[in-house]
Image: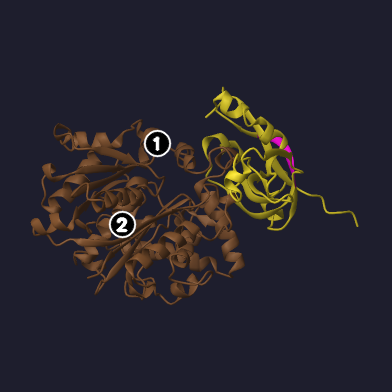
Amino acid sequence: MGELSRIWRESDHRYRLIGHVCRNCNTVYFPPRDICPTCHRDSVGKMEEIQLSGKGSIFSYTVVHDAPPAFRRQRPYIIALIKLDEGPTLTAQIVDTKPENVSSGKRVHAVFRKIREDGSGGILQYGYKFVIDEPPKA
Amino acid sequence: MSEVYVIGAGETKFGELWDRSLRELAVEAGLKAIEDAGIYSRDIGILYGSNSLGAGISYQNDVGSLIADFAGIAVEHTPAVRVEASTASGGAAVREAYLAIKSGEYDVAVVGGVEKLTEVYGSEILDLTSTLLDSEWEAFFGATPAALAAMTARRYLDDFHVSREIMAMISVNDHSNASLNPDAQYRNKLTVQGVLDSVSVAEPLTMMDCSPLSDGAAAVVLASEEFMKKMKIEGVRIVSSEISQDYLALHSRKSVYEFESAKIASRKALEKAGIKNDDISFVELHDSFSIYGLIELEDLGFAEKGNAKSLVENNEIRLDGSIPVNPSGGLKAKGNPYGATGVGQFVEAYLQFKNRADKRQIKDVRYGMLHSMAGSGSTSVVHILGGE
């Protein structure tokens, strides 16, 4: 699972949340894609990189107990579908909180974290996770 | 264009078959199907091997050739290919065989589906089953098939005010039917409380909401009308066969609880068959997770969105209900050996139409619908059998 090039080539997207925008219809996509599913051929050459804010809200979530080997030490962990303010929905962990604090609709923002490690000798892989926004001070 | 018939079917027991290899299972099922059809290997025009994770689990690719070789037909140079469409491999392979006959190119096609999911120990199997997700943007971040189903379940139960108990009833129904199926992996009865009390996999799903890891193989023989008549065999007609796709990743879909692939494939299949949902005598659906059973009842057209609960509450999904669901025991209890799962649905349908389903026999079977699905809905294959 730890082939370097496979991990390295997605660094920009996973470290800095770089998505794509179709300059034909202005729809924002994450993860990046080279063809807009709305504009099809008309989007060719018009998909541009775009920096996403990392802000969004929880659409749904689960607490994972049965985890793949690379995540065993993190069990149980929270995985969520997060709807970003720019439009797209992505799949990511929610961290720095307990499951009872998580609910659909809560505001979250992206943070840079270690995602997984492949065994004791494998490379560490980094990317985005999300934390719940602090409630505004009264 | 020829009509296409199922003229023979066979399967191994589904379960933890540690003493049986991938090839042994495939050959056993294939031989049963061929004997059942009463044909000889020289009659086979083409063979389709259905398998999803053989390379990762058993270090074996080219499963089509493997099956042909150990079925002893390599010497006849019968064409053999593998069909892979994740957990929909079985349905997709039967559809390829259907098209091969329908086109007039072949008179007889055999489909053999096989999988050995218990070959890998502990949580390592999750690395492999998670390859059926979007590997870079779902699995990379720790999502698993169960995690996706769980996120779908949470929204579905909340948005449509469906109780946890109703969802559990899908698994209970599967176990009840499987108790009558000698090929099933789990023949024990299950209670709603048993589902709720089971160990958590991905909240709110427990282990008893999830299909098990299974080994097994299933095979069917498909033939043209002309061949069938020449051999004086009475087959079961495949009335329609449809396949449809959706986004691979759950997060890209329009809705997390609408399988558009299932909606489109089933609607087209019903249209081509010229029938309505009311004409269907039973459905074998792809309930790899209990929540998917509820959603599929809706997307296959048996209930309005959010209303599958009324079918469940009123016991309409039981063997004696208005739309019996998974008479075989379904993915939860008959078992879910990926590549064999969708082919196994044809075995069940064939037995039902032939009045050979013993204690789980449904009365007056007219049409049956089979739904084979990949992962969380990226591919759906729908077949309708019966008529006449």
Is residue B181 visible in this depiction of the protein?
A: no
Q: Is residue B183 covered in magenta?
A: no
Is label 1 in a helix, a strand or a loop?
loop
The spot of residue A136 in percent (x, y) is 86, 54
Count of numbered badges drawn on the protein: 2
Query: What's the magenta region?
Result: A109-114
Callout 2–callout 1 Cβ contact below 8 Å = no
Give the residue drawn at x 16%, y 36%: B73
The spot of residue B255 in percent (x, y) is 58, 58
Considering the whole magenta stretch, tell me its main secondary structure. strand
Q: What residue is disc 1 on?
A: B120
Q: Which chain is brown?
A: B
Give the residue drawn at x 34%, y 45%: B339
Is residue A117 visible in this depiction of the protein?
A: yes
Relative vertical location of residue A93 with respect to residue B373 in this rendering, above or below? above
Give the residue drawn at x 14%, y 32%: B75
Frontmost residue, A21 versus B139: A21
Q: What label sits on residue B345 in the rendered view? A: 2
* Left or right relative to B263: residue B225: left
Q: CA distance from mark 2 to mark 1?
A: 25 Å
* Left or right relative to A133: residue B137: left
Q: Is residue A110 covered in magenta?
A: yes
The spot of residue A46 in percent (x, y) is 67, 40
Q: Which of the image's four quarters has the C terminus of chain A?
A: bottom right
Q: Which chain is yellow?
A: A
Going from N to C along the chain, the mark reached first, 2 or 1, is: 1
User: Callout 2, which amino acid?
Assistant: Gln
Relative vertical location of residue A128 with respect to residue B313 in this rendering, above or below? above
Q: What label sits on residue A87 in the rendered view? A: none
The crowding category of the residue bearing disc 1, from other C-alpha atoms within 10 Å (few below 14, some 14 to 19, many at least 20), is some
Q: Quadrant of residue B23?
A: top left
Frontmost residue, B34 versus B268: B268
